[in-house]
Image (spheres, rainbow, N blue to C red):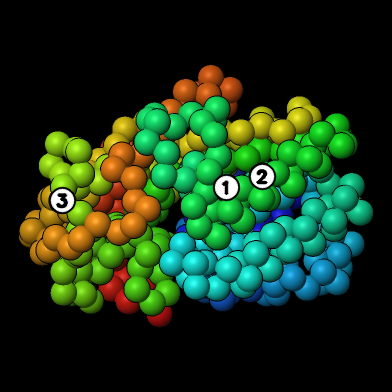
Amino acid sequence: MKILVTGGAGYIGSHTTLCLLEEGHEVVVVDNLRNSTSVSLRRVERLTGRRVDLHEFDLLDALAVDKLFEENQFEAVVHFAGLKAVGESVQKPLFYYQNNVVGTLNLLQSMEKANVRRLVFSSSATVYGASEDVPLSEKTPLAATNPYGRTKEQIEDILSDLGTADSSWSIALLRYFNPVGAHESGLIGEDPQGVPNNLLPFVAQVAVGRREKVLVFGNDYPTPDGTGIRDYIHVMDLAAGHLAALDYVKDRTGVFRWNLGTGRGYSVIEVIEAFGRATGSPVPFQFAPRRPGDAAVSYADPSAALADLRWSARKDLDQMCADHWRWQSTNPHGFS
């Protein structure tokens, strides 16, 4: 198939683009490169021996989106493009709603004009908010607690309404948990701009010497070691989930929702210790007060994805850390 991948130069987008190319699909990427770089796609081309057609513009440019669909016969869209920093979304809510929601509306309108009605949407477990009714299933009530999560929740609502109004649409909503790791080659991986918002890239930057120590927010949670527990999933497992969802929507119509996670939680301390095993040296850390709004425990019930998509995560925490370290140690300053 000829597939449009929005945000395809980013962390999850580049790994999914690689998998799509390896499966024989033709891929066109649109990315504004605000939080990514075209270098990731050049490396994807190097790994696959196949070309990626990159268009550098923003989905807020509705005319450019229309033109892209007029010039290509897409059969499906995988939609990653969007801002994703929780803290920044609290500080700049209008920026997030404009970029994530309006950008998606522009994309959907262009798809409708071009009669392209297969979509895999990159949602997030943040739509569940701080719910501790674990494991989190697709039936868990949505209760996002920050603007970033609410943009994902609102886009899910828009897509649900669209699927109800027009039964010719086929839409997969993928709610994934905490992506980590990198391609086994070490050529592509996560390259956060500024201070990392998530645990593992911060741990990796401490391990490579870019930062002094990891701050562990809270050691008095009702968990075995007192630190928060989350579900971490290898980015290559996550990319495989997108391909499985794309294959599922190919011959069906409707709106489908799946959690993509391992179904197992790891504590902050377990992650830090696993990364130390990957590097061969302990990673320094220091306890700090809890952050408001953080749940003690959060992990997925991925059974629906297994039943419907025949998909399950295969890589464990040690593999996640080993691959992440291979990327970080060979690219200490990311793609730059």
Residue occupying the far top of the picture: 307
Could you tell which of marks 3 and 2 lies nearer the N-terminus?
2
The quadrant of the picture occupied by the N terminus is top right
Instruction: Return the mark for residue 123.
Output: 1
Residues at marks 1 and 3 touching, judged by CB atoms closer than 8 Å: no
Could you tell which of marks 2 and 1 lies nearer the N-terminus?
1
Mark 3 neighbour class, 10 Å CA radius: few under 14, some 14 to 19, many 20 or more? some
Q: Nearer the viewer, mark 2 or mark 1?
A: 2
Residue occupying the far bottom of the picture: 336
Q: In this orientation, which residue lies closer to the viewer: 25 or 253?
A: 253
Three-letter code, disc 3? Asn
Residues at marks 3 and 2 touching, judged by CB atoms closer than 8 Å: no
Q: Nearer the viewer, mark 3 or mark 2?
A: 3
User: Percent x, y for residue 252?
Assistant: 76, 27
Instruction: Return the mark for residue 219.
Output: 3
Describe residue 314's horizontal placement relative to residue 173 as left or right.
Answer: left
Residues under labels 1 and 3: Cα distance?
29 Å
Residue 320 appearing in the image: yes
Describe residue 143's horizontal placement relative to residue 328 as left or right.
Answer: right
The quadrant of the picture occupied by the C terminus is bottom left
Q: Residue at x 76, y 30 (%)?
A: 254
24 versus 254 height, above or below: below
Three-letter code, disc 2? Glu
Mark 2 neighbour class, 10 Å CA radius: few under 14, some 14 to 19, many 20 or more? many
User: Percent x, y for residue 19?
Assistant: 54, 47
Residues at marks 2 and 1 touching, judged by CB atoms closer than 8 Å: yes
- Tell me the residue that label 2 is attached to: 156
Residues under labels 3 and 2: Cα distance?
34 Å
Residues under labels 2 and 1: Cα distance?
8 Å
Helix, strand or loop status at disc 1: strand
Mark 1 neighbour class, 10 Å CA radius: few under 14, some 14 to 19, many 20 or more? many
